[in-house]
Image (spheres, helix red, strand yellow):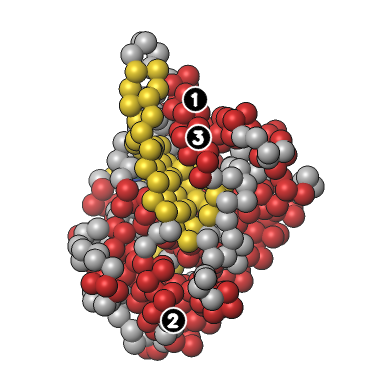
């Protein structure tokens, strides 16, 4: 992967004629525009026909619902929910469900487009979607969370289904929420048999049709990609160093698996603070601590060698691999200036702003994009859906092996596209994804 071969800019500057044609405002701060701009840039490099470019520039459906929920104190509150179905050329819409106070339509649209790209890149037969409810799940009681989930499912039930649109967990939702989701759908739908209805959502508890290995899948996928790609960059996990933003589901699994393979995690930051250990943090102990304490803050008081550091010190820590596994858009140009790493592995969705990416690229940092690094979750979600539909359940070893196979092949597709087109890794990943979508549109044609 010689850097000298990179000729194309990382992303275009909102200059596609498609925006005028579709009446889309060229707002560089809009996350959806940023996402689609990178997709359209890759589509142009690949010379995808105009008809495919305009189809991908906008989602198929943008569903917005409002629904009332009775709160514990007896009053009723009105909630706003979204389901954006971006594209289903490759199969049913697929994508997570986020419960968060900052959920907005444009963000959900952006995440839905990323899902289209992600599913295509790892070659699972799904399209892309994303959903969300504007709420603060950490402030809701368990009963309120259940009623919000059930009312949201009843509001969108006619627009989803095991053969049409299959949600999954994302930030603020978990296996319990997916269990309520499936139960509600099974109760209110007619004409879909029990077992098939179970496949309306993935990320369910194992006792209720969930797949072994789903919880760790995204973190494991990040490590599978790094194991495949680091040697080409003259790096390796064994003996390598990394830092992580976020120590939730994705971050903690990535951290634990990185150390299990002989690497060292030097620094971790989350919403409560940042910690550092020059000898390497005990990633399993940190996981147990975060689950108990709610964040990394204070870990230094319980573990010898660990110390509290500032946000600036965290970003400046010298590591081989920097893994953002928290929110979108955290790597701004200012943060990118501070960063001291050779590789960024995007475990979160869209963690790097276009301006931040330009700074990193000027510094010669290799960015392994989110549609590749964070695709492990949807891959095992696909395995869960297959198991639900077939009623044949896999052991953990089979899930791990199949996940590894999908991630390694996806990483190789990106490497091939990079060499063939002489582009950086993000554009290469979109090209590898769009190649499949373009071929399917060429075969299917446009109805009627
Ligand atoms: P999570 O809720 O389990 O963890 C989120 C982490 O982000 C926590 O450690 C939290 O402390 C940290 N965080 C929140 N705000 C922060 C801030 N301001 N500064 C620093 N850290 C902050 O969520 P998750 O499931 O681990 O997801 C993390 C990211 O990965 C999200 O972008 C999500 O969309 C993406 N993702 C998740 C999956 C999955 O299977 N869970 C799959 C693909 C992508």
The disc label shown at residue 153, or none: 3
Residue at 77% x, 49% y is 390
**Residue at image location 40% in from the left, 17% down from the top:** 70
- Label 1 C-beta lies within 8 Å of the nearest ligand 1 atom: no
According to the image, label 2 marks what residue? 48
Q: Tell which residue pokes out farthest to the right in this image.
A: 392
Picture coordinates of residue 413, whole percent (x, y): 55, 76
Between 20 and 401, the residue placed more toward the observer is 20
Asked where in the image residue 64 lies, by quadrant, the reply is top left
x%, y% of residue 442? 54, 79
Which image quarter: residue 189? top right
The residue located at (38%, 38%) in the rendering is: 65
Q: Earlier in the sequence, mark 2 or mark 3?
A: 2
Which residue is identified by label 1?
A: 146
Q: Which of 108 and 298 is in front in this view?
A: 108
Marks 1 and 3, the one that precedes in the sequence: 1
């Amino acid at each position: 992967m010689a850097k000298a071969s990179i000729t194309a800019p990382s992303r275009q500057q909102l200059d596609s004629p498609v925006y005028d044609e579709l009446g889309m405002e060229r707002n560089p701060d809009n996350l959806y525009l940023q996402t689609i701009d990178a997709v359209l840039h890759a589509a142009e490099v690949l010379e995808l026909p105009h008809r495919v470019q305009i189809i991908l520039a906008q989602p198929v459906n943008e569903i917005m619902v409002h629904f009332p929920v009775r709160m514990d104190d007896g009053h009723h509150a009105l909630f706003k929910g979204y389901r954006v179905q971006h594209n289903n050329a490759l199969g049913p819409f697929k994508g997570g469900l986020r419960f968060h106070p900052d959920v907005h339509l444009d963000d959900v649209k952006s995440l839905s487009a990323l899902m289209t790209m992600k599913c295509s890149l790892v070659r699972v037969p799904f399209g892309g979607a994303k959903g969300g409810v504007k709420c603060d799940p950490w402030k809701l009681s368990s009963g309120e969370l259940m009623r919000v989930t059930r009312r949201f499912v009843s509001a969108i039930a006619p627009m989803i289904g095991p053969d049409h649109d299959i949600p999954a967990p994302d930030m603020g939702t978990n296996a319990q929420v997916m269990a309520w989701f499936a139960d509600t759908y099974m109760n209110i739908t007619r004409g879909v048999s029990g077992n098939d209805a179970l496949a309306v959502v993935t990320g369910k508890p194992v006792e209720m049709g969930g797949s072994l290995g789903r919880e760790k899948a995204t973190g494991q996928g990040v490590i599978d990609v790094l194991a495949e790609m680091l040697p080409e960059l003259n790096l390796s996990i064994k003996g390598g160093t990394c830092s992580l933003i976020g120590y939730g589901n994705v971050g903690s699994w990535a951290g634990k698996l990185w150390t299990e393979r002989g690497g060292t995690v030097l620094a971790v930051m989350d919403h409560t603070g940042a910690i550092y250990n020059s000898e390497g943090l005990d990633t399993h102990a940190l996981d147990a601590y975060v689950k108990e304490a709610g964040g990394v803050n204070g870990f230094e008081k319980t573990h010898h060698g660990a110390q509290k550091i500032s946000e600036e010190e965290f970003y400046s820590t010298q590591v081989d691999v920097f893994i953002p596994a928290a929110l979108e858009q955290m790597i701004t140009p200012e943060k990118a200036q501070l960063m001291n790493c050779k590789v960024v592995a995007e475990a979160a969705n869209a963690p790097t702003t276009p301006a931040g990416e330009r700074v990193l690229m000027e510094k010669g940092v290799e960015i392994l994009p989110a549609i590749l690094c964070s695709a492990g979750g949807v891959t095992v979600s696909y395995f869960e859906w297959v198991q639900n539909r077939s009623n044949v359940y896999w052991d953990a070893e089979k899930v791990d092996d199949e996940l590894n196979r999908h991630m390694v092949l996806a990483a190789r597709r990106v490497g091939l596209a990079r060499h063939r087109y002489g582009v950086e890794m993000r554009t290469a990943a979109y090209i590898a994804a769009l190649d499949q979508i373009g071929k399917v549109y060429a075969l299917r044609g446009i109805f009627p």
